[in-house]
Structures are given as C-alpha cells and as structure tokens.
C-alpha cells in the first residue's frame, strides 16, 4: 500500500475551483437524461444559473452525507467489535444497499430501469462477503477466513486495490462521490420525464403542441400526437418575447413515452 503522505492530494483552492464546472456538468447530465426520454437533441439544452446552484447544494450535501456515513460506520465498527476487513466489507455492503434503495425509489414505477442498477451495485459487495467463505472454507472461524482473504489481497492486489492505492484515498473518495452524483442526476432526469403527466399545451402555427421543456425564454415543443404515448420526432424551438407572447394551458395528458430502455432513450 502507498504511504499516506505520498498519495495524491487536492488542496481546498483546487476543490473550490472545480466545484462550479462539476455542478454545471451534473446539471447537464440531469437535462441530458430528461431529453433522452423524449428524443430531442442535447444541443437544445441550456443550463440556467438556478440549476447550477441546485447542483452545488446537492454536491455539498452528498459530500457531507458520504463523509458522515463513513465516519459513523467506522465508529460503529469499533464500538461493535467488528474488526478488520470483515467490518469494512459489511460497511461497503450497507452503503451499496442504500444506493440501490435510492435508485429503486427514483424509478419506483419502472423496474426495467432500476433492476440493472440494483444488480450492479449489490453484486460486487456480496461477492466480497461470499467468496472468502467458499475459497477459505477449510479455515476455521469467520474472521479468520476474511483475514486469510485479506492476506491474499495484500500478496496479489486486485485491480480495484491498485487503482485506489495509486489515486489515494482523497481522490478515490471524490471519484466515488462524482460517480454517485452522476448516477442520481441521470436517474432523476429520466424519472422526471417518464413520470410526468401534466404538460402545457399551446397552439403554434395552427397545430397543438406539447411543451416538453423551457430554458429561460426558450421553449421546446413537439406536436401533440395520438396515441398519446407515441411522440413525434419533430421538435420546435421558439423564444418568448414581448413581440411573440406565449399562451398555453396545462392539461393532464398522461405519460407520453412508454417502454423506455435504460441509457438509450425511447423508440
């Protein structure tokens, strides 16, 4: 393992400098996920200042929550007598369960979306707990089995262990935090689009149009089609101004898109 003093570290000035572009990227991921459901190009997306501020708040909240989680669980391991690798693997499993539960709550009505994420997040920590029991089944004692597995890990580090040792704990923590924020931002964007039922309906050049998204004075619309769950791939982008006022009414038209596949949008 690398000495802690030799591991890469980022100072506070660098972290503050990276906060704004990171928040912008997270906000863009949310809007990109929303757009992917309806199929309009990402070039239509405009990130507003309010979205960046919300992303910064989310970034700080997620960082604080993740740090407190690790601190409390480490304290619990010490108080509860769970020592060494077994305790930390249990902590890893518990954290993965929390993340998987969060994703399932976001995609509650869409199991095809959350099941792959749940499997992805639970498979590795479960294997970390199950494999030592199988590989070291001749070793007596539960903790002894995990100590033997840790000895093998120290002798022949896995790819994950090498990556963490190379990056250092601080950078590894930040990478994990960014990955979780991207996951939840993307999931929230898709779920927002898939669960929406009420839309503004306006008349544009004699045709009824559904307002999919507004960015400041920019409006993205698509023709109101039948059946309602199959959207046209035609989009109209227009701008509100004093010379071109926008008149619309809210209608409960129900979900517009069905049978979306994870990551690739809807067809």
Image (tube, helix red, strand yellow):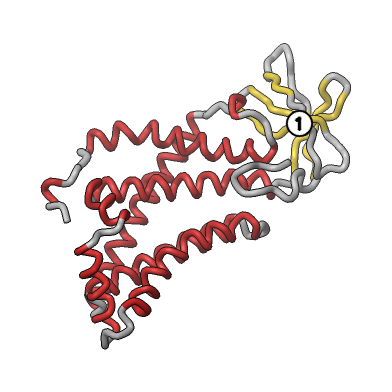
Q: Picture coordinates of residue 30 (x, y %)?
A: 54, 40
Report which residue position mark 1 lands on.
233
Q: On the rendered structure, is 146 left or right of 41?
A: left
**Residue displayed at 47% across by 65% down:** 122
Q: On the rendered structure, is 188 left or right of 199?
A: left
Q: On the rendered structure, is 180 left or right of 31?
A: left
**Residue displayed at 15% across by 52% down:** 2
The total number of labels drawn is: 1
Q: Which quadrant would the C terminus be assigned to in this image? A: top right
Q: Is residue 137 above or below residue 257?
A: below
Q: Picture coordinates of residue 240 (x, y %)?
A: 68, 19
Q: Is residue 121 above or below residue 144?
A: above
- Please name whichever residue, 180 or 192, is drawn nearer the observer in this view of the structure: 180
Q: On the rendered structure, is 81 left or right of 216?
A: left
Q: Picture coordinates of residue 185 (x, y %)?
A: 51, 45
Q: Is residue 34 above or below residue 207?
A: below
Q: Is residue 100 above or below residue 214?
A: below
The answer to which quarter of the image holds residue 38 is top right
Q: Picture coordinates of residue 32 (x, y %)?
A: 57, 36
**Residue displayed at 27% across by 45% down:** 171
Q: Residues within 10 Å of mark 1 (few under 14, many from 20)?
A: few
Single out the residue that lies furthest toward the bottom. 140
Secondary structure under badge 1? loop
Q: Which quadrant would the N terminus be assigned to in this image? A: bottom left
The answer to which quarter of the image holds residue 109 is bottom right
**Residue displayed at 29% across by 85% down:** 138
- Please name whichever residue, 132 or 200, is drawn nearer the observer in this view of the structure: 132
């Amino acid at each position: 393992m690398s000495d802690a003093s030799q591991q890469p570290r980022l100072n506070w000035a660098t972290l503050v400098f990276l906060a704004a572009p990171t928040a912008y990227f997270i906000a863009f991921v949310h809007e990109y996920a929303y757009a992917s459901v309806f199929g309009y190009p990402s070039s239509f997306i405009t990130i507003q200042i309010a979205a960046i501020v919300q992303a910064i708040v989310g970034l700080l909240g997620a960082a604080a929550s993740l740090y407190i989680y690790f601190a409390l669980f480490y304290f619990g391991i010490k108080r509860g007598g769970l020592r060494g690798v077994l305790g930390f693997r249990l902590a890893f499993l518990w954290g993965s369960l929390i993340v998987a539960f969060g994703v399932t709550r976001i995609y509650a009505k869409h199991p095809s979306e959350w099941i792959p994420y749940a499997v992805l997040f639970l498979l590795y920590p479960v294997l970390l707990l199950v494999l030592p029991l199988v590989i070291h089944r001749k070793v007596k004692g539960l903790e002894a089995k995990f100590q033997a597995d840790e000895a093998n890990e120290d002798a022949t580090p896995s790819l994950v262990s090498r990556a963490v040792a190379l990056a250092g704990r601080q950078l590894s923590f930040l990478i994990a935090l960014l990955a979780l924020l991207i996951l939840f931002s993307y999931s929230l964007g898709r779920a927002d689009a898939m669960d929406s039922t009420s839309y503004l309906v306006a008349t544009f050049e004699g045709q009824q149009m559904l307002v999919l998204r507004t960015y400041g004075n920019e409006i993205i619309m698509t023709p109101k089609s039948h059946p309602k769950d199959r959207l046209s791939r035609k989009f109209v982008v227009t701008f509100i101004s004093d010379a071109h006022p926008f008149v619309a009414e809210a209608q409960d038209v129900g979900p517009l898109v069905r049978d979306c596949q994870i990551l690739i949008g809807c067809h």
